[in-house]
Amino acid sequence: MVTWLTTADVAELYGVTERTIQRRITKGTFDGKVKETIGAKNKKAYMIDLSSLSLDKQKQYLLSKGEERAELIEDEVQKDEGNLEEEYTLGELREIHGEAFEEKLEEALKKKEAVLKFISLGHGEKTSGVKAICKEYGFSQRALYRYRKTYDEYGFVGLIKKPRKDKGESRLPDEAIRFIRGCYLQPMRPKITHVVKMYRKKAEKMGWAQVSKDTIYREIEKIPEPEKCLAFEGERAYNAKYMPCITRTYDDLMVNEYWVDDGHTLAIWTPEDGKIKRYTMSAWMDMRTRAMVGWCIARNSNSQVIAAALRSSIIRYGLPGTCYMDNGKDYKSGYLNADTKEEFFRGYEGIFKALDIKTSFAIPFNAKAKPIERFFETFSSELSRYLVGFCGESIEERPHNISKKEILIQGLSILDVSKFIEGYMESYNNSPHSSLGGKTPMEVMKEVDLIRHDMPTEEELDMLMLRAEVKTISSSGIKKFGIYYWDDKLIPHFGKSCVVRYDPNNIGELYVYVDGKLTCKAENKELMSMNATEEDMKRWGKLKAEAKRATKEAIKAYEVRQDEVRRYMLEDYVDEETLNNMLTPRNKEVVNKAKVVRMNKHTAKGKEKKEFDTEIENNKGFEFFEKLGEEFLQAK
């Protein structure tokens, strides 16, 4: 089973002339593995055994000429085809193994070379020779004898590893496979050796085959990666890596129909007050044009920063139809959205509702849900990376030569960083985008219709952007920041809920909204001092009296008496006489002879005492109380 090559074939392999190969034959270069033949015109020619060439030349020949020689090798194989389950030609093996064919071929050539050395061993050399060959090629003696037998029966092609007929199929029953995979797919990530141990215990009970650990390893390797991800890393990782994604198109949207927002921590170290800071940017993008419509930088992300970025966007490009946002607490705060139904019905709507902007929230923990994420990657790559102070989006990206001490001295201030960002945003909005067919966001914005044409004034916008909170109006006013705020217009609304809006930079006043209408501007209430003057007391006395009078008049205006309410509720339970006795006391003398004597300025006794008090002699006052006592005893 020798593959014979012509001198022309060998010359092509070595890149020399055919005459050079003939001279090497005469010098015995090919170890005598040459035979003479009759060539053209009855001249002597030579054939060279392929195995006499170096391994790299054998491999080169089989890869380049293997298809042409396939029939010859196939003929050799067919000699004892009954002993082989299924035979393949060299060409078929090339197709089956694909990219791995070259590696399989190289392995077969090494086996062949070892076998030929084994065959050439003389009498008495086998014991030591076999050991030397096995050590040289890394084969076991058992493997070498098996390769020799295969080569004798099937030739070189027999040494190329064949694909198994049952490849991909398991010898285990389905329930055993399910048990193996179920044991492995646990959050604590069991070791495969432990799964083998568990399988063997289970197999003994169930009567399954006691297979080798390699078989169990192979079953575990077949587990799909999505299953491993979900079992080991959880739903969040699975959603990000393997959850099927919907590819959205934005070409059918109108300008400002959808704005999307997200926060981004700048990968820039900024010096401030002797410390290194990393600021956060909140930015809004119009999904139809991909334009960055507004942004705001702050030390930390919060709902007020998001609102400030929204305000700048509205002033520049108008009102959006829907705001598409993350699920974070900042976006769902009461400042932007009413936290609860109770707050909503008490008159607090939040900025989005007040501006008639719809809201939509992305799928939680889904990084692919917001297209603005790609913008931040581009932003960091094209701008942040080249600014002084770039510290990398992660530790791995951090420049090795960056120094906090140097940044404190020569780093960019946040004002300088803002200027660079402003310039970048302008450039980005006026650069062609492949997703827009080569047009710029600004060009598309001019071509496509707006979703809304209404627009608040800056004053109205500023008022709505104030911080807001639901409060209760008490008789002391409205308590906020640990102090009370007051305005006389609050008096008719004691006990009511209201919405207060305020500027965090000016806490001296609150804008108070009752039933959705601006009622007053309450100011920081002046607390009554222990050294308050009589005029102060009189002023507050009048204010309290007025508040009480207004409250009494409001109750009286309802024109429903207490006795009426009682009569309506009790008339079904007792007769009218009993009800009248309860509502109108029969013995009025009992009331007139009450033990407590009222002596305020409106009663007769009070006026009588006042006359005694005006006398110069203090004893008169005692005489008055003696007289009261005598009258009381006589009544007894």
Image: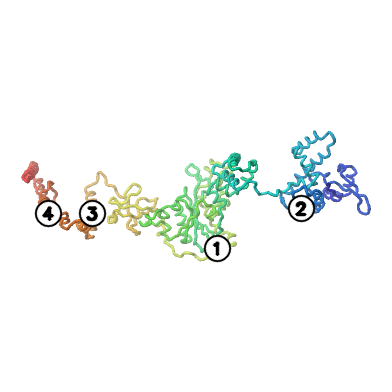
Where residue 400 sits: x, y (%)? 59, 42
Q: Comparing marks 1 and 2, which lies closer to the viewer?
A: 2
| SS label for mark 2 | helix
Label 3 vs label 1: CA separation? 64 Å
> Which residue is found at the position 44% from the left and 64% from the top?
454
- Residue in the image at 24% along x and 51% along y: 540
Distance from label 3 to label 2 (Cα)? 106 Å
Q: Mark 2 highlights which residue? A: 91
Q: Are marks 3 and 4 in contact (CB under 8 Å)?
A: no
Query: The residue under label 3 is which amino acid type?
Result: Lys
Q: Find the distance from the CA under tag 1 to the CA under tag 4.
A: 87 Å
Q: Which residue is mark 3?
A: 548
Q: Give the x, y percent position of residue 547.
A: 24, 54
Q: Nearer the viewer, mark 1 or mark 4?
A: 4
Residue located beneath label 4 in the image? 586
Say whether disc 2 or disc 4 marks the residue closer to the N-terminus. 2
The local secondary structure at tag 3 comes to helix
Of label 1 and label 2, which has the lower sequence position?
Answer: 2
Q: Residues within 10 Å of mark 4 (few under 14, many from 20)?
A: few
Indicate which disc, 3 or 4, sits on the residue closer to the N terminus. Answer: 3
Q: Considering the numbered disc 4 on the image, is that residue within a helix, a strand or a loop?
A: loop
- Mark-to-mark CA distance, 3 and 4: 33 Å
Disc 3 crowd rating (10 Å Cα; few below 14, some 14-19, many 20+) is few
